[in-house]
Amino acid sequence: MARLRKYALPAVLIVVAFLFPAINAYLDEAFEVTLMYPVIIVAVYVMLALGLNVVVGFAGLLDLGFVAFYALGAYVVGWLASTHFRQVSFSFGTTATSLTGGQIEGIHVSFWIILLIAGAFTGLSGAIIGAPTLRLRGDYLAIVTLGFGEIIPKFFQNGDDLGGFNLTNGTIGIKAIDAPGFPFLPESMSAWQRFGTLDLNPWYYTILVLVLITVYVNIRLRDSRLGRAWISVREDETAAAAMGINPVTTKLWAYAMGAVFGGLAGAFYGAFIKNIFPTSFSFNISILILSMVILGGMGSIYGVILGAIALQGLNFYLLPKINEWVHALGDSLGSAALSNVDLPKYNFFLFGIILVAMMLLRPEGIIPNRQRAEEMHEGGPASGDAVGGRARA
Amino acid sequence: MATREATKTRSAAVIDSVRSSTWGSRIAVVLTTILLVLLAVEAVQEPAQFTSQLLIGLTNGVILALVALGYTLVYGIIELINFAHGDNFMIGSFVGLTVLSGTILGLDLFSPITSNSGVPLRILGVLIALFVAMVACGFLNVGIERVAYKPLRNAPRLAVLITAIGMSFILQNVGLVWKGPAQVPFPELISNANILSSDAIIFRWKDLFVVLVTVPLLLSLSYFISSTRQGKAMRAVAQDKEAAAMVGINVNRTISITFLLGGILAGASGVMYGLFNGITVFNVGFTQGLYAFTAAVLGGIGNLTGAVVGGLLIGIIGAMADQYIGARWTPIVIFGVLILVLVFRPRGLLGDRSAVQGGGE
């Protein structure tokens, strides 16, 4: 029975997720609402939130610059799958084709290889950024990550003339990124040969598989020796060190693992959106992802997924809806202020309130991780470091 | 003879300290020296431009120092990075702007004070704007502490930091609703004219104004903390809350007063920032707040002199980066300084007790 209960819910969720395109097709026919595009974006954020969950939830390190890895992943795709580097011409397993039949300019590598490269690259960047900084105390570390989260998009913004070399194309960003696909498939599966903008199903299945891999790795990591080391470092770093755990290496792993997921999500996002701009990777995104983790419950995988879905649902669906209602109310009351207000612009007001209210009222989140919840409600004088880590006397 | 011996031991001490220094600090010294030499070369080549830029840096630095003091006061007493402090600064500039516009809460109290008003009226307007912004921000800061930080006083440090970030976003959106997403112009109340008769070196009335407001504020803050009963209580609470409570100090009230002081400084610097730069915007608090935090860390967070020194240094670094590297790289330079200081010298230039105790290194 217990075994059944343990596997029944995830199995049902996975089946529903795989059948979603069919459900969406039905909704499209019956109610003329198509949810495909928002659902793919939500899935990207689920992945980002799960990545941040490794850092904030498992290891208890506050990372305020998670957007840096998201941006790095997106730019890796931009560099390796577009005409950006016109100086060179290199193609490998790509879906990009030249109109003239000759060599195409720029680097064009298969998206699936880029995913691996992006994951490795961001993981390595995470380790390089983390190595000197992870010795710092929790709140200092948060500010250092914030600094990196600010520097990296700014660098992308200014990187169009690094000693005459155009690395990032500045504020214009990198355009026309190649679509992923399997060029070796037969003609009958043309949607899968080269992912298009009309049929979003291949995109959906790709991100679904990526999310499932992320969830699986998250669960396995949590239950591994490393995962237990993260928890012990989070609860009491000194005691963990006394038990033979190297806190710096342990934290470094958390930071690098989180970065890998951020980079993968960024790579998918870059290929999906096709045009990337440095301004889409602002501090606000870091805070949005953090709010998802905190709302759902730090360290709780279901909770974090729910948090991501809830907040992006709010962004995409609820706020525009409420906005319409307010406009209608304003029209009927004859109030110009109400009928012209643009509520979605103020969504970060709501996220700010979520952060404050959750910390004050229910720091363990909507679906708490039991161990975290206990840690959160332990008494004791303040000076505890990690988020939810036991306060040290 | 005695003097020669003294110099001998002194040089021996210098050699000893060089020998015992770490590689990190040696590299830092070498790099800083190279940077200073490069700056000196520029200074010799175009002394007037360098001096003007230095003055701009000092004036900006003075404004930053006031904000940095707010961070450092709060950090010194409850070890919290008050992330909402920068947005408090933004609210201060908005309050000042509203006071100068003459229309408060929809009421037309007086006609707007603009650059066309007479000199006495302009002076009066600036003083009133400063005063109202200081009071408003002071109480806003106290309110934030009551609502968002006080209930979490025994929670893990990062939990409070998260609420502080939440408060920062709430304030930013209040600013967004209040004045809209675009930059808002400030009236040009203080003359842009150069005080000095020289054409090459520029020191404007504006710069003088900033110095004239800041120096008395800094002196009175220093007096308050070193010489009054309440200031003594603040220092006691910063050292040990429990022991302070045992000798009869009202810890909660002392913390409130600290937030009040920080808010007052943020309000004053917000109005000055607006008058000095001629514009303000709803998210100005984020960058300026981070710069000021960098200043506080550079000087040694929790250390009041450190905040002022750090503010001046960051102001100068920013101005020099504007001039010699390019304005668009300035944020990267300053955040780079923040990261380098936190990584290699978390207790800052002048050092601080709390950072050392916390095992920052």
Image (tube, coloured by chain):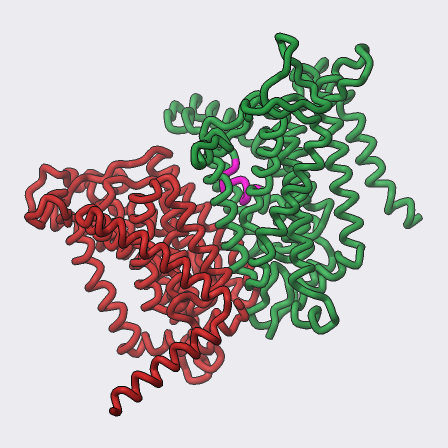
Chain colours: A green, B red
Q: Residue at x 13, y 49 (%)?
A: B205
* Farthest-out residue, bottom: B2
Q: Residue A246: x and y, percent?
A: 69, 65
Q: Is residue B209 above or below residue A328?
A: below
Q: Residue A339: x and y, percent?
A: 42, 24
Q: Residue B328: x and y, percent?
A: 37, 39
Residue A59 seen from this side: yes
Q: Is residue A342 above or below residue A300?
A: above
Q: Residue at x 51, y 33 (%)?
A: A167
Q: Is residue A282 magenta?
A: yes
Residue A343 seen from this side: no
Magenta range: A281-288
Q: How many marks?
A: 0
Q: Is residue B68 left or right of residue B164?
A: left
Q: Residue at x 48, y 45 (%)?
A: A150
Main secondary structure found in the magenta portion: helix
Q: Residue at x 48, y 57 (%)?
A: B148
Foreground pick, A200 / B134: A200
Q: Is residue A180 above or below residue B50?
A: above
Foreground pick, B353 / B9: B9
Q: Residue A215: x and y, percent?
A: 76, 42
Q: Is residue B236 left or right of residue A81?
A: left
Quadrant in which the N terminus of chain B appears: bottom left
Q: Is residue B273 left or right of residue A305?
A: left
Q: Is residue A200 magenta?
A: no
Quadrant of the image occupied by residue A81 = top right
Foreground pick, B92 / B67: B67
